[in-house]
Image (cartoon, rainbow, N blue to C red):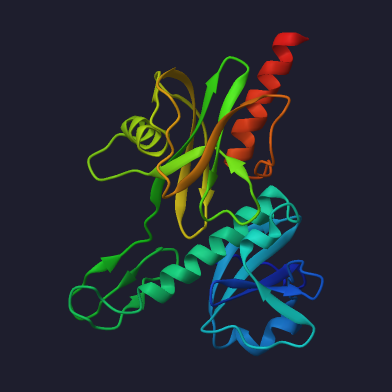
């Protein structure tokens, strides 16, 4: 990623290691000034992430997560609700770049070591066979199904906090995103829906998705969960919802948009 030439006093460094970010003991993201980051600047790969509140943010990619006094290493999910949208997005970028660098140290064609392309070119190349590697995203759809003043929310098998959310799934080879919406809804809850309506998108660094959000109206069928990914799914009235994802997530935004529409109808 392209560098940014600002004075050292406006620079802040984010340390990334082993899929986690450096935080302080209370659990908030720790941004280092130039002096604090000096032990790693000379040896770690460095990316310019962007500007935030007048500061130039850089990511330093470490090969591991060393013990640092007064700090701890935490996953990005712990920062949901603690960081503003801009900073969360930049930290997510850092984690995706770090993972990509780690997974593309060697060429998938000939096995030779790769090297970064010249500054500004977001890619690695293999000097031996000239194959280039560019970061790739995995497109996913996420859909909130509605029926009158109710929406369908599901609890995933992997959810440890009992959160109920919209349905989501990866786009498969040869599919349009709209096809994915219909397929995933049928596979996960056994329902058919009317034509999905695009809502918004969100980069989602867990580990590297682009979430494409949709609203869709119920058409037919009875809820039948797959029992694998989804263990529970029910219709919920807009004013009697269970625990749902925070509004920093596109799932939370889809739900909040539906709730706002229902309130507007009654105002």
* Residue under the image location 45 percent in, 52 percent down: 209
Q: Please state which of residues 33 and 99 is positioned toward the viewer in this rendering.
A: 99
The part of the image, by quadrant, that contains residue 111 is bottom left
Quadrant in which residue 51 is drawn: bottom right
Quadrant containing the C terminus in the rendered view: top right
Is residue 1 visible in the rendered image? The answer is: no
Give left or right: position of 214 versus 264: left
Q: Position of residue 18 (x, y in %)?
A: 54, 77
Camera-side residue: 53 or 195? 195
> Within the image, what quadrant is residue 248 found in?
top right
- The residue that appears at 80% across and 76% down in the rendered structure is 25
| Residue 174 image point, x, y percent | 22, 40
Vertically, is 196 above or below 26? above
Image position, residue 26 (x, y; %): 82, 71
Q: Is residue 208 visible?
A: yes
Viewer-nearest residue: 61 or 120: 61
Query: What is the tally of numbered marks visible in this picture?
Result: 0
Does residue 183 appear to the left or right of 30 in the view shown?
left
Q: Is residue 103 left or right of residue 258?
A: left
Rendered location of residue 165, percent (x, y): 58, 40
């Amino acid at each position: 990623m392209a560098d940014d030439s600002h004075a050292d006093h406006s620079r802040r460094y984010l340390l990334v290691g082993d899929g986690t970010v450096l935080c302080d003991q209370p659990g908030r993201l720790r941004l280092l000034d130039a002096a604090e980051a000096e032990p790693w600047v000379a040896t770690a790969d460095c990316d310019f992430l962007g500007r935030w509140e007048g500061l130039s943010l850089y990511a330093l990619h470490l090969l591991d997560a060393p013990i640092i006094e007064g700090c701890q290493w935490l996953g990005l999910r712990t920062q949901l609700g603690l960081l503003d949208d801009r900073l969360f997005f930049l930290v997510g970028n850092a984690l995706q770049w770090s993972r990509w660098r780690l997974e593309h140290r060697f060429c998938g064609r000939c096995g030779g070591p790769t090297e970064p392309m010249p500054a500004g070119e977001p890619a690695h190349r293999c000097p031996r066979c000239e194959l280039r590697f560019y970061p790739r995203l995995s497109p996913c759809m996420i859909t909130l199904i509605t029926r009158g003043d109710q929406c369908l929310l599901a609890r995933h098998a992997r959810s440890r906090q009992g959160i109920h959310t919209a349905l989501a799934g990866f786009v498969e080879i040869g599919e349009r995103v709209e096809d994915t919406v219909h397929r995933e809804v049928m596979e996960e809850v056994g329902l058919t829906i009317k034509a999905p309506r695009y809502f918004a998108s969100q980069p989602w660094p867990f580990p590297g998705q682009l979430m494409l959000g949709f609203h869709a109206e119920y058409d037919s069928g009875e809820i039948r969960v797959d029992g694998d990914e989804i263990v529970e799914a029910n219709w919920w009235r807009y004013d009697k919802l269970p625990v749902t994802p925070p509004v920093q997530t596109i799932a939370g935004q889809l739900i909040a948009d539906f709730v706002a529409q229902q309130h507007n109808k009654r105002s």
